[in-house]
Amino acid sequence: GRLEGVSAGQAGAGGPGLSGPRLRRTQRGRGRGVGRGAGGGEAGACRPPVRQDPDSGPDYEALPAGATVTTHMVAGAVAGILEHCVMYPIDCVKTRMQSLQPDPAARYRNVLEALWRIIRTEGLWRPMRGLNVTATGAGPAHALYFACYEKLKKTLSDIIHPGGNSHIANGAAGCVATLLHDAAMNPAEVVKQRMQMYNSPYHRVTDCVRAVWQNEGASAFYRSYTTQLTMNVPFQAIHFMTYEFLQEHFNPQRRYNPSSHVLSGACAGAVAAAATTPLDVCKTLLNTQESLALNSNITGHITGMASAFRTVYRVGGVTAYFRGVQARVIYQIPSTAIAWSVYEFFKYLITKRQEEWRAGK
């Protein structure tokens, strides 16, 4: 029988790949085989080697075709939780370094010094405070993100550039998926960042949620939502377009190449993170409502992106918009690599099991 290959976007972090004969292969022998795994070994029954055209290059076996929405959601949830858990201490440092008027005891020269001082003066587990609420939000947020992205990417690519790769489709799919991701993640971000700040009065998630709800109302959990979208929409557009550009350079044949996917994803994440740091600083201010920054403001709570931008400039000038850029880039490089590699691995694993189950019926 004939096994249809999937796009390189399914095999490695996002972009649609080649179409036509190079993504199709004929299986010979009895039984229904399954494609090679991420390590290149056989995942199915033994079969004779496939004869190839001399011009076609190495045999390309990617993920099995037919990954379902559920598969994308489960793989995305696992990837999101693991990404945030592994990188959480750096995220804590980033939040503190974005403080507009930090306490003298919370002024850090670089990321490593910040981590060392936090652990030495506040305890080993202090950089992990708020991790539970982040993991709780990251699961559904990333499940929605990846499922929406995969569906829209395929649909838009078929419309814009049938059978080929479309940077516009990749960027647009990521932007739309961001709407769902941020809607699920924003309340967790508010709680997490308030717990990460120096001298935070909150030791438990429930205490923080109760205090925010009683003192500022339910709207406080979405006070930074528009800024989050304003930041993440261009972030995702830059991210996916940079990723596709690098893939065309490092992996022009779009074969399954984990190292090129990790490298392209990490570089794309770093570029997008650096470019959108000013918006991230404003988002942090909206989430934390820093008391010292509020004292320098005319009114009470800072609401809206325009107000946040004015406050940042008033307190720290132009350079304040790039507070924490080092920590943000350092966070994003492995974060993007972890998210995509874990997502693609679990997508492959789940889909392979589904194919084996169907073959055994």
Image (tube, rainbow, N blue to C red):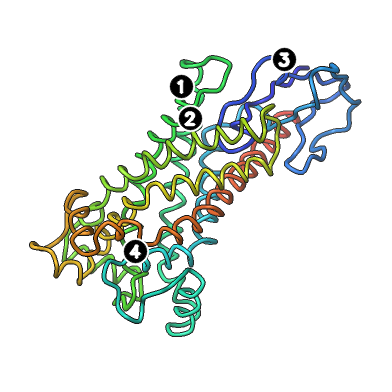
Residue matched to label 2: 170
Foreground disc of the pair 4, 2:
4
**Neighbour class for label 3 at 10 Å: few (<14), some, many (≥20)?**
few
Comes first in the chain, label 1 or label 3: 3
Tag shown at residue 177:
none
CA separation in Å, label 3 and label 4: 51 Å
**Precedes in sequence: disc 1 or disc 2:** 1
Amino acid marked by disc 4: Gln
Residue, x 83% and y 25% (percent of image)?
Answer: 31
Residue under label 1: 156
Marks 4/2: CA–CA distance: 30 Å
Q: Amino acid at mark 2?
A: Asn
Q: Amino acid at mark 3?
A: Pro
Measured along the vertical axis of the image, is residue 220 above or below residue 89? above
* Residue placed furthest toward the front: 318
- Measure the alpha-carbon separation of dots 2 and 3: 23 Å
Residue corresponding to mark 3: 21
Q: Tell me if 113 is positioned left or right of 360 in this view.
A: left
Q: Which residue is mark 4?
A: 98
Residue with the most extreme right position: 48
Q: Residue at x 44, y 40 (%)?
A: 145
Up/down of 138 relative to 90, above or below? above
Where residue 251 sits: x, y (%)?
A: 67, 33
Q: Answer few, some or many: residues within 10 Å of disc 1's Cα (few below 14, many 20 plus, some between 14 and 19).
A: some
Look at the picture and state if 275 lies above or below 287. above
Badge 3 marks a residue whose secondary structure is helix
Mark 2 or mark 4, which is nearer the start of the sequence?
Answer: 4
